[in-house]
Image: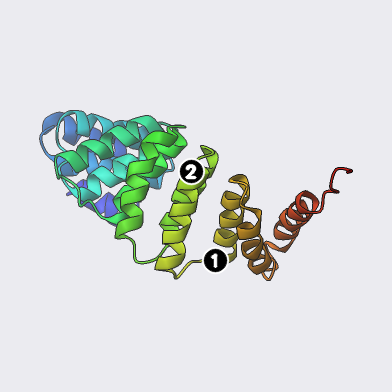
Amino acid sequence: MLLGLYMQRENYKESVPLLLRLIELAPEKKIYWLQLSAVYGQLEDYPNALAIMQLAYGSKLLTEDAELRRLADLQLFNGIPYRCGQVLEAAIETKTANADDKLYDKLANCWLAAGELDKALPPLSRAAELASNGDAFVRLAEVHVQRSDWAAAQTALERALAKGQLKDAANAQVLMGLALLSQHKLAEARPWFERAQLSEKHRQTAKSYLQLIDSQTKRPLPPG
């Protein structure tokens, strides 16, 4: 009752010792763990907010989709992206989380933050297939660009443009031009940069690539 009163009045600091005591008395009650983590979050004490969720996860108390996503968010925020990826992969494997496009996108973010580009590709691909627009395919293409896999980047961008409803279509056009240019397909790359330069945001980048194409196509012929 006292905890309820404190929570109602948003007296979060006073709630911490009560919740710690309640967890000591009834460690099997998940609600106290979740409340304590949430209180630490309200106090912007994110390391302790994560620690409590980690302990609950280790005790197999976190069994709901939202709980696992919150744990993953806290791990990512606290700079533990690899563990975040492991948690979400386990949640998908055991079907304890709804494997929608947002979950796959979150999993990809974990692996990208951990520098695991190869591990990020499958969840990014799955997120892109499930999403209602082509933006996830653009992100997939960006990862392929980082890996210098230009053919794969081109394929992802083709799917992005086909799916449509892109937040930044000109960015996809620049990337498509870059993917083609990097495969020495200069004639095919040019139209994409010409379209992209209509965007104020990407105009300068597109013009630079067009100048590069011009410099490579207008080289003087060798004598004789």
The residue located at (64%, 65%) in the rendering is: 191
Badge 2 density bin: few <14, some 14–19, many ≥20, Cα 10 Å: many
As drawn, 195 above or below 23: below
The amino acid type found where label 2 is placed reads: His
- Say which of 20 and 87 sits in front: 87
Q: Secondary structure at mark 1?
A: helix
Q: Position of residue 24 (x, y in %)?
A: 16, 29
| Residue labelled with disc 2 | 144
The quadrant in which the C terminus is found is top right
- Say which of 205 and 104 sits in front: 205
The residue located at (40%, 36%) in the rendering is: 111
Q: Secondary structure at mark 2?
A: helix
Instruction: Look at the image and tell me whether residue 211 can be seen.
Output: yes
The amino acid type found where label 1 is placed reads: Ala
Q: Position of residue 4 (x, y in %)?
A: 21, 51
Seen as rendered, the residue at the extreme right is 223
Q: Position of residue 206 (x, y in %)?
A: 70, 59
Alpha carbons under labels 1 and 2: distance apart: 18 Å
